[in-house]
Amino acid sequence: RKPVSLPRLNEMRERGEKITMLTAYDATFAAVADAAGVECILVGDSLGMVCQGLASTAGVTLETMAYHVESVARGLRRVQGTAWLLGDLPFGSYHESKEQAMRSAAQLVHAGAHMIKLEGGGWTAETTRFLVERGIPVCAHLGLTPQTVHALGGYRVQGRGDAAALTLKRHALELQDAGATMLVLEMVPAALSAEITAQLPHCHTIGIGAGKGTAGQVLVMHDMLGVNLGKNPKFVRNFMEGASSVRDAMAAYVAAVKDGSFPDDSLHAW
Ligand code: KIV
Ligand code: NA
C-alpha cells in the first residue's frame, strides 16, 4: 500500500470515493485503524475527554498532544502504516499570534504529524495562510468547535438560520482561500454541509454529525466502538455491534462510509 498523501486524497475526491477518518491516541489502536483501511488518523484533543477524563477539550495542553502524536506516529511506523496523520492544536496554542501557532504546529510536526488542525473561522484564515506558506498542511474545523463550547452555549447544532449559515459558508471559503486542504464540519445541518462541500473543490470536508454530503467522515474511536463514560451523541453508530473484533468494527465503518450507508441522515434532528 502507498502512503496516503494530499494528492491521493485529491484523487479520491475526484473519483467520488469518500475519505475515512478516525481518531486514535495510542500506538496500538492507530496501527489497528490503519490495518482496517482508515485513510486518515486524527490525534484529536478529544483525548482530553476519552483519555484524561477532562470535562471538555479546553484543558488539553500542547505537551499532551505532542506525547500522543508521537505515540501514534511510532505505532504507524512499527507496522509500516500508510495513514495520513493529523494532530489537533489545543486551546491556547494558536490564539495569540501566527508565530505562536507556527511554534505549536512545529512541535506536532516534530512529533510526527503530517497535518495540523485548528478550530474556528475568521481570524484563523490569516493563521492558516501563515502555516500553509511555511509548508504545514492545515485542516480547519467549523460548526461545533468544542474548544469554545462555553461561548457557543453547549454541544449543539451550528449554522442554523440564514445568518449563521452565511457566516459559516463565508468562513469556509476564506479558509480554502488561505490554503486549508481539509475542513472538519461538526454538527452542521446536512444540506448546509453539502452546499459548503460543493463550494470547496480544493478543501475536503470531513463531517461529524453533518450528514452524508461531505467528502469524508470522522468519528471519535471510542464512540464508534461503543466504549464511553457518558451517552453517545445520536449521530454516532456503534460499529462493534455485529463485529467480532475492533479491527472488524473499524473495517465496517470504512465500508459503511464508502458505500454511503453511514451516516444515516434520518438520525439527525438537524
Ligand atoms: O478532537 C477530535 O476528536 C475532533 C474530531 C471530533 C473531529 O476534533
Ligand atoms: Na478536536
Image (spheres, rainbow, N blue to C red):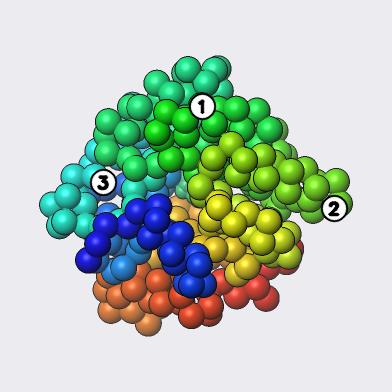
Q: Position of residue 116 (x, y in %)?
A: 43, 38
Residue type pointed to by label 3 = Val
Q: Which part of the image, by quadrant, shows the C terminus?
A: bottom right
Q: Is residue 9 depicted above or below 256 in this figure?
A: above
Going by the image, does 182 lie left or right of 244? right
Q: Is residue 244 depicted above or below 1 in this figure?
A: below
> Are dots 1 and 2 in contact, CB under 8 Å?
no
Q: Is residue 145 visible?
A: no
Question: What is the spatial separation of the Cα atoms under label 1 and label 3, in whole angstroms?
Answer: 26 Å
Question: What is the spatial separation of the Cα atoms under label 3 and label 2, in whole angstroms?
Answer: 39 Å
Residue type pointed to by label 2 = Gly
The residue under label 3 is 72
Locate residue 123: give its quadrant. Answer: top right
The residue under label 2 is 161
Give the label, 1 or 3, closer to the camera: 1
Which of the two discs, 3 and 2, labels the residue nearer the N terminus?
A: 3
Q: Position of residue 193 (x, y in %)?
A: 67, 59
Q: Is residue 149 depicted above or below 218 in this figure?
A: above
**Residue behind label 3 places its C-beta within 8 angstroms of ligand 1:** no
